[in-house]
Amino acid sequence: MNIQQAVKMALKSITGNKGRSILTMLGIIIGIASVMTIVSVINGSNQQTLKQMEAMGTNRVNVSASRYDGKNVFDDLYTYCNGLGSDLVLGVTPNSQFSATVVYGAKNSASMEKNQNYGPASGGDSSADSTATQDMPPTLYFGSDQYAACNNFKIAKGRDITQTDIKRYAQVCVLGARAAKIFFNYADPVGQVMQVNGLPITVVGVYAEKDPDSQWSMDNIIVYPYTASRYLAAGTQMTEFTVKASSADATTEVISRVTGYLGGLISNQNGYFSVYSDNENQQSMNQYATQMSLILGGIAAISLLVGGIGIMNIMLVTVTERTREIGIRRAIGAERRSIVTQFLIEAAMLCGIGGLIGILVGTVGSLIAGRALLKMTVWPSLSITICAFLLSVVLGILFGIYPAAKASKLQPVEALRAE
Amino acid sequence: MLITLKDVYKIYSEGLESEVRALDGVSLTIERGEFVAVVGQSGSGKSTMMNVLGCLDIPTHGDYLLDGVDVKELTDRELSHIRNKQIGFIFQQYNLIQSLNVVENVELPLIYQGIGAEKRRELAMAALERVGLLGRERHKPTEMSGGQQQRVAIARAIATHPPIIMADEPTGALDSHTGHDVLRFLQELNRDGSTIILITHDNGIAATARRCVRLADGKIVEDAPQEVDWL
């Protein structure tokens, strides 16, 4: 007996008792569908996180440094870091937020505060977001001429903040793409003058949009030269800085160098400082995601196990029911091996068909769950789909072994006697 | 010699108080081309005889040589091959597989021989033609009368052209008319060269064979050629 005949035979037996076949498959269907959905959603969420991290930039070293005497350490840090060379450091900037009222024409950031409930655009449909009632006030930053390098921004229009701007306390700013859209809609902001706390500030450039979908708030920023804090936010001490290392390996080196340097500037008596890498954050987030997928995957695996036991149960019943058939087959010349093959293939096919249905349900489940939880379209990857199918077939074979062995061990004489 | 039984015993629960000697020292030889009826009351051991002769069961003691081969020495797999190629079984209850249609039932022993689909269909159709069931090959066994089902079973038994046909009460579930047809067909097969072993409790049916072996309490009490009641 060859495989093709065995497959035909199994198909006949499965379709011959549709109701029971479907009930038997149910366990596998649910198991496979939940495994697919869980893995897909976790993958989707990981991708989303990764995308956010990429948008933010990797290999960032966050420095927090403050002196009790209020002396600003940034100028020293800037000089030191740029002295390290571009094979270690790509840039250094303050990363300090401040609040101010930004006005351009009829647009006033103060009046946007009321609409803070607004969340990310649903369905990624950004064209509907341009009405004033949905505007969020921009986040205002003080940055160096290397702010863009440190935060993965690229200039789309005009120019970036320069060292000259910083030296001259220039009244200029660069807008994030979304901030530009909020204040200027589709007009060109470069050269326009905005009022910040009543002071005229000229827009010199606009950054390219980083992420049109989910992380729109990353683009809703306005960056001012940090020396402008003298008149925009008098008395604030800049304590948060970002150093952009050139690579993951360089990050470690930069951390130790910067730590050493700041240790010379700041002691326990006159201030505090800390230096840590964003990469560690990202690693721990990845670890967390892996743990989550292991836990959820484990739960799904248990449901698959239960499904597999269900298959074994029904196959055992089938063997008992078909004892006489087995006897007939043995009498007319079926080897034990043929009987084993027949029942194994039947179990494998039962599970395989269940797996295929499970994949369909799981795909729909992934789409729905992705939409509901991540607000993105999550298609199960090809590798997950293939794995899910193979898993179901393997389960069928695994749980089919015992019933098949039982069937083949029946003595022909006794099997023929069965009713 | 095709079949040789030498002092064969089939004993259940041997050594216990409930010991049953289904075959109690049976010796018998059957030559190629014979038509032998094994007759006996129920409990005489004739079904056990059929199981042993059909390689469905192994004797407890004694030797069974089939075509010179000692059956005791064979593996389960080799026994399967003998049942598949050397013997065609016809049972009282037809023993067709209900989920398969007529032609699929007839093809079954050919499948286990590993014969390709085309050749298989050809052989099965030839067997069905022989029993006069051409045109009914797509029917399910349940859609047919008892006589027709038994003819399907006969077609299955002869599809592989085995040298030996074993019929266990082949007319037991049929009315006398269709039973008559079945017996006549067995005689026809015998005339064409098949060795037929017919197991029955009915002396009238046994009369269709050329030789009658009578069993009682697991022993052969009579073994003689007889005047054939040609049908």
Image: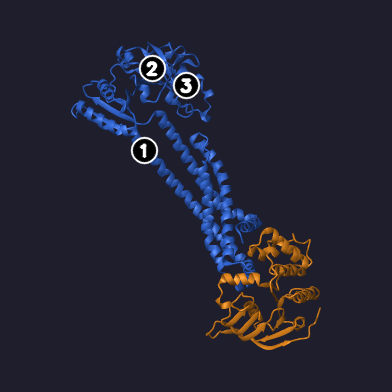
Please indicate whether residue A27 sits to the left or right of residue A237 in the image: right
**Which sits earlier in the primary sequence, circle 3 or circle 1?**
3
Chain B representation colour: orange
Please indicate whether residue A67 sits to the left or right of residue A410 in the image: left
Q: Residues within 10 Å of mark 2 (few under 14, many from 20)?
A: many
Q: Chain of mark 1?
A: A
Q: Which residue is mark 2?
A: A160
Name the element at disc 1: helix
- Seen at 46% across and 16% down, the residue is A183
Q: Which is in the foreground here, disc 2 or disc 3?
A: 2
Q: Residues within 10 Å of mark 1 (few under 14, many from 20)?
A: few
Q: Which is in the foreground here, disc 2 or disc 1?
A: 2
| Spatial CA span between label 2 and label 3 | 25 Å
For badge 3, the amino acid type reads Asp
Q: Which residue is mark 3?
A: A135
For badge 2, the amino acid type reads Asp
Residue nearest the viewer, comparing A82 with A413: A82
Chain colored blue = A
Residue nearest the viewer, comparing B88 with B220: B88
For badge 1, the amino acid type reads Gln
Q: Which residue is mark 1?
A: A283
Residue A150 placement (x, y as % from top left) = 35, 25
Name the element at disc 2: loop
Name the quadrant of the N terminus of chain A: bottom right
